[in-house]
Image (cartoon, rainbow, N blue to C red):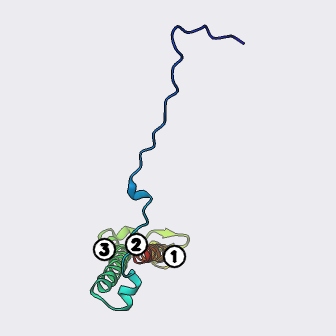
Amino acid sequence: MTVPPPQDGPAPKPTQRVVVTSPRTRAPRARRPYSGTREINEQSELGAVYMRTLIRAQRRLGLSVCLVVCGSLSVLPLLFSIEPDLGRARVLGLGLPWFLLCVATFPMLLLAGWFYVRQAERSEREFAELVERP
């Protein structure tokens, strides 16, 4: 163990810690006069805006998922009409068009349904947090 050499002059003062806070941090939060659920139940203008927002988000999600699924399925006939040799290809003993329509379509539909439910529940959770916020 080594001993530090003696210092010339007075020993340095320990630094003092200063905590800077806003006076508002300790003050209680002002509550809204009405909660969002009360606005919705009373069918006020603000409650109508809340509901329109939720419905618009749900509608946009549903149309987007439907557009992607229907768009990807509607490309198949176009693809087989442009390239007729693809229609004669075989996969697992089935013709490629039948394989895509009968086998590959169902996992895509299940994935689209899972995605829709997940996003719709997330949207509803965010809406509930918005409405219930104090």
The residue closer to the viewer here, 80 or 46, is: 46
The residue to which callout 3 is attached is 78
Residue furthest out toward the right: 1
Secondary structure of the residue carrying numbered label 1:
helix
Residue at the (45%, 43%) spot, across then down? 19
Three-letter amino acid code of the residue under disc 1 = Val
The residue closer to the viewer here, 23 or 33, is: 23
Based on the displayed image, in which of its 4 quarters is residue 5 positioned? top right
Residue furthest out toward the bottom: 42
Query: Badges 1 and 2: C-beta atoms under 8 Å apart?
Result: no
The residue closer to the viewer here, 87 or 43, is: 43
Residue at the (36%, 87%) spot, across then down? 40
Residue 108 image point, x, y percent: 47, 73
In the image, residue 5 sits, relative to residue 100, either above or below, namely: above
Residue at the (37%, 82%) spot, across then down? 34
The residue to which callout 1 is attached is 103
Badge 2 or badge 3: first in the primary sequence: 3
Residue density around tag 1, few if under 14, some if 14–19, many if 20 or more, within 10 Å: few
Secondary structure of the residue carrying numbered label 3:
helix
Secondary structure of the residue carrying numbered label 2:
helix
The residue to which callout 2 is attached is 87
